[in-house]
Amino acid sequence: MAANVDPQASVPDATLHTESSGAVVRQPRTNLSRAWRRFRNNRLAVVALVVALAIILFAFNAPLVSRYITHVGPEDQRLLDNFGPPSKQYWFGTDEYGRDVLTRIAYGGRSSLGVAALAVIIALLVGTSVGALAAYYGGWVDTILMRFVDIMLSIPLIFLLILVGTLLHVGTVTLAILIALLGWFGLARLVRSEVLAVKERDYVSAAHVVGVSDWGVVTRHILPNVLHIIIVWATLAVPGFILTEAALSFLGFGIQPPASSWGNMLTNSTQYFYHSTRLVWIPGLFITVTVLVLSVIGDALRDALDPRLNE
Amino acid sequence: MGHYLIRRLIGAPFLLLGITLITFLIIHLTPGSPIDNLALNPEMKPEDLASIKKTLGIDRPLPVQYATWINQLAHGDLGISLKTYQPVRQQIFARLPNTLVLTVCALILALVLAVPLGVLAALKRNSLFDYIMTGLATLGQSVPGFWLGLVFIIIFAVQFKAWGLPALPTGGTQTMPGGGSAGDRLRHLILPVLTLSIAQLAGWTRFIRSQMLEVIRQDYVRTARAKGLSETRIIMEHAFRNAVLPLITLVGLALPQLFGGAVIIEAIFSWPGIGSLALDAASTRDYTMVMGTVFFISIITVLSNLLADMLYGVADPRIHYT
């Protein structure tokens, strides 16, 4: 589940510090092109990138798929054609109401990927700000923010999500906000420990000495140097959030029918095992392949941005 | 390290207090109430609704309700379910053994398989075996648990039956309530445990592999080699122990993840555990039951994290907490 976004998140600070001190300085922004070259040399990652782009293009152009390829809307029912096998007209067959599975997969993908992307953007903003604030100002700001993070990390995420998901009837955007607001804690810890390491560097003191404001120091001198950590977190958070959304929608707390998401397409499929297992296979494979390629990209990005690991 | 642990121990009750506050706020600041459904009944008179509210104690101001709840918790009382009117604690304890069996079996299965697979993958680095294991592990971390459960049901129950093979049961803890034999209970465990353990298994295999690769590079392993020790002794006595140590922390952290995963697995396999209890309670707006289960799971989380830290400190004397 979402918990495997970053398994390091709740490892005690002691272990995080030891890992994080050296890499930051060795990896300034100018090395991004070198990182890209390293990424390009990873053939598996390039394949994954191509597949991911294909899926993203397919999903975000769902209306075009509907109009020019399948010629049916995602909620158009043809009851006489229900449980139809894959055919020239219905590439992936039809579901229990005779709706075209390909069209629903495209629209569902748009919801699932859209929710995950929006959630990651929100979580990035919140997590980075909180982590940077806590580390930069220290003292009681740090104590309050980090104790809050400790508390939230001690409540299993899925319980919180189900809790809020049942109490509020969520739409696509609120679902993204919900996943984001409960998904930034690990990032905040990560950013905090990185910023703690960076803020003692000479160039940060130098910036202070020449009179750069706090805001300027943080945004121009500190954050660019922890950027690689944030990028890697974001790439790995997207697949994690896709899984979270899918699980919530599967359980009926996420995107509500008749709108489709990869998760809620599986909800009803369980009742029709004996008609057609295809309704289980197709959405599940889309989730798995998407999450898989995004994870491979995230791993490759981490290796590319942190060459120490490639010795 | 003693100092650090004492601080953590003192912090734990405050952590739990914070958890209660946040759970309470989330539940009570969202619109709706547990008696919304009763209010839909046209026969229901306003004064009856008011008296039900009064009986359940949900007519009082929120701070009072919170204080009452905390006071109850301090006495080990999780309150009365708003739906079944039974004590929450009693229901949790009735379901707890089922969830524990599920999670502990999944934990053991994942450990027993992950350690040898990870070590082997590391020792045969860049071999076909290594590539296959790494690939499977990445796949295992990408597969949504609920979908994997459905796939297992299709293969081991639906298809096995179609092929005339002995199909595995897919729901409940036993075929006949109360009368299941040990073998029957075991067969009911197979699919849920398998499904629940895959994610941990995959994650740990990758972790052990990278740990092992890290340790093999260390000076003391080179020294052991230079001394002329046999490769088996180097691996088993020097490398293995140090590579596996950090796993203790991960096992501690995995417990809450397993409990979280159990919510979904229990829903798929109709497993009567705490996860399905919480799920049902959430959908019927049974506030006390929801708060009770979340609080209970959180206690387990906090304790297992604490335990993991302590064990790690004991197991690895190099660790100095500050």
Image (cartoon, coloured by chain):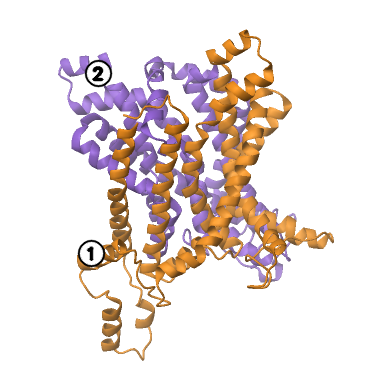
Chain colours: A purple, B orange
Badge 2: chain ID? A
- Work out which residue is located at the far right of the displayed protein and give it: B164
Q: Nearer the viewer, residue B236 or B65?
A: B236
A220 relative to A102, above or below = above
A309 left or right of A148? right
Q: Nearer the viewer, residue B152 or B83?
A: B83
Residue at 55% x, 50% y: name it: A109
Q: Where in the figure is residue A24, as x and y percent of width and height?
A: 38, 20
Identity, as a three-letter code, of the amino acid under mark 1: Ala
Badge 1: chain ID? B
Question: Which residue is under mark 1?
Answer: B67
Identity, as a three-letter code, of the amino acid under mark 2: Val
B233 relative to B312, above or below = above
Question: Which residue is under mark 2?
Answer: A204
A7 left or right of B191? left
Helix, strand or loop for disc 1: helix
Instruction: Give the class, few, some or many, for how many residues have Cα within 10 Å of label 2's Cα (few <14, many ≥20).
Output: some
Whether labels 2 and 1 belong to a single chain: the reply is no
Instruction: Give the class, few, some or many, for how many residues have Cα within 10 Å of label 1's Cα (few <14, many ≥20).
Output: few
